[in-house]
């Protein structure tokens, strides 16, 4: 472990200015921000999409993304101004004294290499430790991060562990060289609430144990309350305000900060419906020899929303795969309007394919980056409705208007869109088929709270206007309360509990439902500590 002087200043950013190039000109991204971080301290960066959080977090390491440039200011890391260092000189810090934990662990690992090799690669390459020592310390980190079978889990490949386990292994990778600074960039966004509790606890403890300074980037105020000593609020590349966490949570000064505190106020009143448009009946399904769904029964009422909730690996997305025909059930059936659907996608008619559409979690990977918005939306409109030429363009414009975007977006590429705009385009693509059932698979989990609220309101309006029926897969209980009529709780491939939203959220709860509900973070800095004590962690 390195000798680190607690409370001494490690990082000082002064009047930093960063520009990005798009639309054939340079735009200001960071507009004169100041930041100070002491050793062993955790600073939370919050703000909506486009605020500059990730750009500032990367800049703390002296790094700018392609198409960006630093135009002013200083980045003093342990007395060295990184703005005056070449990339070659800065690489001596990267992966050694500075490390980074990304939002999407799955996209950050090489699928062809074992986890322990990837965990220790930068440490061994920098000559900090010999392989045997690095491997031993990696296993100790796995144990400290509460990973199962810490002695052997590193021998697995990325696809052989869960999302929460992979996120913790990425944290072990970042901690392997015992860095001075870690930048956590939305590291728990895509995790279910029970896994998030474990990951947050592990990350907080490991940072404290090693005396590492950290910048924690997130749009989740409840999460930042558990992690950060101080919070800095950003908007449009400028600082709104900064304060100690408890003070910020109790009495934010600025109106913008107060608006962040008050978002997600949607509380949809549940509605009953006797008419069933879709039914999953007595379904068992397998991945190879692994039994993933066990006697699943779910009914979707016409014009209503059924939320599927549960941990990663509970079977939520597998249910969606069975409904859409991407996975054939071993036993049971899927009925649409009382007519049994062919179990395989290949056996379904065009009309059957049209009526059930899906919106995916990660809009970034759900769209072809080489296609324009017009190409993305027009393809299903052309395929299912046979539209061409002027009629097809007119339909695309109508769909853009339905998702609150205008014709100016029609020739843009995905890289020219914000996260919320990308998800709206994915919604428009689903609507282009003129469906009756839409499956929404974690469609808001990667978005900040203000953008989430906009997407949820949009989905609610579209449901009312078009009489759509939704299956909404999510691990976010606040989202469930905002959009659902009925709730299905899943665990280990089985339905634990189902019923009207009011029934599911009213005690007494089955043990697993109680675990889920008690794992939803609260805007109380003591919440995680108190929860861990109650669970004897």
Image (spheres, rainbow, N blue to C red):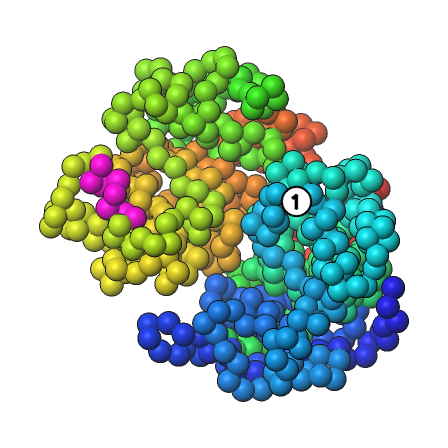
Q: Where is residue 464 shown, x and y percent of the image? A: 31, 41
**Residue 451 picture location, percent across and down:** 45, 57
Image location of residue 402, percent across then percent down: 27, 50
Residue name at image x 48 percent, y 74 percent? 68
* In the depicted structure, whether residue 125 falls above or below residue 528: below
Question: Is 275 rendered above or below residue 31?
Answer: above
Which portion, as a residue range, is magenta? Answer: 376-383
Q: Is residue 185 visible?
A: yes
Choose between 261 and 89: the one closer to the eye. Answer: 89
Based on the picture, tell me whether residue 146 belongs to the magenta stretch: no
Judging by the rendered image, the residue that carries numbered circle 1 is 113
Quadrant in which the C terminus is drawn: top right
Secondary element at tag 1: loop
Q: State which quadrant residue 350 falls in.
A: top left
**In this rendering, position of residue 142 left or right of residue 380:** right
In the image, what residue occupies the spot 22% across and 34% down? 384
125 displayed left or right of 342: right
Q: Residue at x 60, y 43 (%)?
A: 111
Does the magenta portion include 378?
Answer: yes
Asked where in the image residue 99 lies, by quadrant, the reply is bottom right
Majority secondary structure of magenta residues: helix
**Visible residue check, residue 275:** no
The residue shown at (53%, 81%) is 70
**In the picture provided, is 129 more to the left or to the right than 418?**
right
């Amino acid at each position: 472990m390195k000798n680190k002087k607690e409370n001494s200043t490690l990082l000082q950013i002064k009047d930093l200015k960063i520009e990005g190039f798009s639309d054939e000109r340079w735009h200001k991204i960071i507009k004169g921000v100041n930041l100070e971080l002491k050793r062993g301290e955790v600073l939370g960066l919050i703000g909506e999409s486009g605020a500059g959080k990730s750009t500032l977090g990367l800049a703390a390491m002296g790094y700018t993304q392609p198409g960006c440039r630093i135009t002013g200011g200083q980045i003093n890391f342990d007395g060295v101004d990184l703005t005056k260092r070449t990339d070659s000189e800065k690489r001596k810090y990267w992966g050694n004294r500075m490390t980074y934990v990304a939002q999407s662990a799955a996209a950050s690992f090489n699928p062809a290499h074992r986890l322990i090799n990837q965990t220790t690669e930068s440490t061994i390459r920098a000559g900090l430790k010999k392989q045997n020592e690095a491997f031993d310390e990696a296993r100790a980190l796995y144990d400290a991060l509460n990973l199962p079978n810490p002695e052997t889990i590193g021998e697995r490949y990325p696809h052989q562990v869960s999302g929460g386990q992979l996120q913790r292994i990425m944290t072990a990778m970042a901690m392997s060289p015992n860095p001075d600074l870690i930048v956590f960039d939305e590291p728990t966004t895509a995790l279910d609430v029970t896994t998030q509790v474990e990951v947050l606890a592990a990350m907080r403890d490991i940072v404290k144990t090693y005396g590492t300074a950290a910048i924690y980037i997130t749009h989740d105020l409840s999460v930042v309350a558990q992690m950060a000593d101080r919070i800095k609020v950003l908007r449009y590349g400028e600082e709104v305000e900064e304060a100690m966490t408890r003070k910020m949570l109790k009495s934010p000064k600025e109106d913008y900060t107060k608006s962040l505190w008050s978002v997600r106020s949607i509380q949809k009143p549940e509605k009953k419906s006797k008419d069933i448009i879709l039914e999953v009946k007595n379904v068992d399904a397998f991945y190879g020899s692994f039994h993933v769904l066990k006697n699943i029964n779910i009914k979707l009422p016409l014009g209503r929303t059924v939320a599927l909730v549960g941990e990663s690996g509970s079977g939520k997305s597998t249910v969606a795969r069975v409904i859409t025909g991407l996975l054939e059930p071993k036993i049971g059936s899927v009925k649409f309007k009382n007519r049994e659907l062919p179990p395989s996608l290949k056996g379904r008619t065009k009309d059957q394919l049209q009526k059930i559409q899906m919106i995916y979690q990660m809009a970034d990977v759900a769209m072809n980056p080489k296609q324009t918005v017009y190409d993305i939306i027009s393809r299903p409109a052309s395929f299912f409705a046979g539209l061409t030429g002027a009629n097809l363009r007119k339909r695309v414009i109508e769909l853009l208007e339905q998702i609150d975007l205008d014709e100016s977006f029609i020739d843009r590429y995905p890289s020219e869109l914000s996260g919320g705009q990308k998800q709206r385009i994915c919604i428009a693509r689903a609507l282009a088929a003129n469906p009756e059932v839409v499956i929404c698979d974690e469609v808001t989990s990667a978005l900040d709270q203000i953008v989430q609220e906009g997407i949820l309101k949009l989905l609610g309006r579209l449901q009312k206007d078009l009489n759509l029926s939704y299956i909404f897969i999510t691990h976010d209980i606040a989202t469930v309360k905002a959009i659902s009529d009925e709730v299905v709780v899943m665990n280990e491939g089985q339905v634990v509990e189902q019923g009207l939203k009011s029934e599911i959220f009213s005690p007494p709860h089955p043990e697993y439902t109680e675990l889920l509900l008690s794992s939803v973070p609260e805007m109380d800095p003591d919440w995680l500590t108190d929860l861990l004590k109650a669970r004897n962690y």
